[in-house]
Image: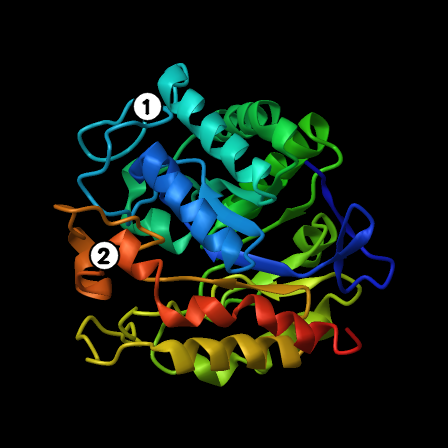
């Protein structure tokens, strides 16, 4: 196991002193939805394709496929919120540790989301799920537990998941999470996963992070931001590695812009690879993260989308079919765009 560091050029990563191009995959729901034998199949398949970073939520993903395996870090309440006042579930921790160990043994860097936006006030998602919000001391304690439990695997931390900032409390929660993570795992790299199309990051938050992440996303018309988003980040926050950690997912319906009526269009292999290439060429050259609809939410036989997710994403393929989408075969080869001399 080896930690990622930032290269002296401020634009790339290193691992073991060698250039590291982030070839990420989106598996937000792995800890809650995947079985160990499925995880092994997945890891071996993605390793053969050249992936090296796995983005995972440490909490139950709000839009994961249900039913899941029924194993959560804290007790689940009837309304879908977590009982943050309870002790962590040792069975969940045991499984999460096993998954990280299996990943690390195959050379993957775990990228762990600490605070998804539904538990943080003054975000778009907590406005939809107000009962999901945690008090700030509970968020700090969760961050401390995550760092202390997972630091042996040399993870990277995404302080936030799919967040925006609709008031001062969101920034306060994230800054306090950052302070806890810095104290508990001082050598780890930190960033924030922002919601689709969002670039309005404060200078205070940007200064507190080791690298910057944006999401061009899946909303109809998001291809128009593939050059403008990295340009904005590079202009406003120079000197930090930058990557698109959520371009359009292969197999995902185009999410309607400003409405709930499905567009009828699906992102295919060509759309995904175009988004990845354009992101890197526009300056987000630290890496790229791929996503497959049905894999990020880990749909198993009998599982279905529910609520808002069902109206936005339709019914995705099963995880093992989504894992085999053709676009994933080409992601690691995009390193040549960031390191043309190689």
Mark 1 residue element: loop
Describe the colour scheme in one phrase: rainbow
Residue under pointer 1: 83
Residue 136 image offset from top left, x and y in percent: 50, 31
Q: Quadrant of the N terminus?
A: top right
Locate residue 135: give its quadrant: top left
Mark 2 residue element: helix
Position of 12 compared to 268: left or right?
right
Q: Residue at x 70, y 58 (%)?
A: 203
**Whether label 2 touches label 1, CB < 8 Å:** no
Q: Residue at x 81, y 61 (%)?
A: 10
Q: Residue at x 44, y 66 (%)?
A: 328
Locate residue 187: give its quadrant: top right
Residue under pointer 2: 309
Q: Which mark is residue 250?
A: none
Residue 167 image offset from top left, x and y in percent: 49, 52
Q: Is residue 239 or residue 165 the one in the foreground?
A: 239
Q: Is residue 239 or residue 21 the one in the foreground?
A: 21
Relative height, residue 89 to residue 105 (above, below): above
Question: Cα distance, mark 2 to mark 1?
Answer: 23 Å
Q: Is residue 47 or residue 70 the one in the foreground?
A: 47
| Residue farthest left in this picture | 302
Viewer-nearest of labels 2 and 1?
2
Q: Is residue 201 visible?
A: no
Query: Mark 1, residues whose alpha carbon is within 10 Å: few (<14), some, or many (≥20)?
Result: some
Q: Earlier in the sequence, mark 2 or mark 1?
A: 1
Query: Mark 2, residues whose alpha carbon is within 10 Å: few (<14), some, or many (≥20)?
Result: some
Q: Residue at x 43, y 43 (%)?
A: 121
Position of 137 compared to 5: left or right?
left
| Residue farthest right in this picture | 8
Q: Quadrant of the C terminus?
A: bottom right
């Amino acid at each position: 196991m080896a930690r990622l560091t930032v290269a002296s050029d401020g634009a790339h990563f290193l691992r073991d002193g060698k250039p590291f191009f982030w070839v990420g995959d989106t598996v937000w729901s792995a800890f809650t939805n995947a079985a160990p034998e499925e995880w092994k199949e997945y890891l071996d398949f993605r390793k053969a394709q050249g992936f090296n970073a796995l983005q995972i939520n440490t909490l139950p993903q709000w839009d994961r496929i249900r039913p899941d395996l029924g194993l959560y870090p804290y007790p689940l309440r009837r309304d879908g919120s977590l009982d943050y006042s309870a002790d962590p579930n040792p069975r969940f921790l045991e499984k999460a540790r096993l998954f990280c160990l299996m990943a690390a043994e195959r050379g993957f860097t775990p990228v762990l989301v600490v605070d998804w936006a539904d538990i943080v006030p003054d975000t778009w998602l907590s406005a939809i799920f107000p009962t999901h919000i945690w008090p700030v001391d509970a968020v700090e304690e969760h961050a401390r537990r995550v760092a202390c439990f997972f630091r042996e695997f040399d993870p990277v931390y995404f302080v936030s998941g799919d967040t925006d900032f609709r008031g001062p409390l969101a920034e306060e929660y994230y800054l306090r999470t950052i302070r806890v993570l810095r104290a508990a795992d001082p050598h780890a790299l930190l960033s924030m996963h922002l919601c689709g199309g969002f670039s309005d990051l404060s200078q205070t938050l940007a200064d507190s992070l080791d690298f910057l992440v944006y999401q061009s996303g899946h909303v109809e018309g998001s291809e128009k931001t593939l050059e403008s988003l990295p340009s904005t980040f590079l202009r406003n926050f120079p000197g930090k590695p930058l990557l698109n950690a959520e371009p359009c997912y292969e197999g995902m319906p185009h999410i309607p812009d400003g409405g709930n009526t499905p567009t009828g269009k699906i992102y295919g292999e060509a759309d995904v690879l175009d988004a990845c290439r354009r992101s890197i060429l526009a300056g987000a050259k630290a890496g790229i993260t791929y996503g497959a609809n049905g894999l990020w939410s880990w749909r198993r036989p009998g599982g279905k989308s529910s609520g808002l997710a069902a109206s936005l994403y339709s019914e995705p393929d099963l995880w093992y079919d989504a894992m085999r989408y053709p676009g994933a075969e080409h992601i690691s080869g995009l390193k040549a765009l960031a390191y043309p001399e190689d």
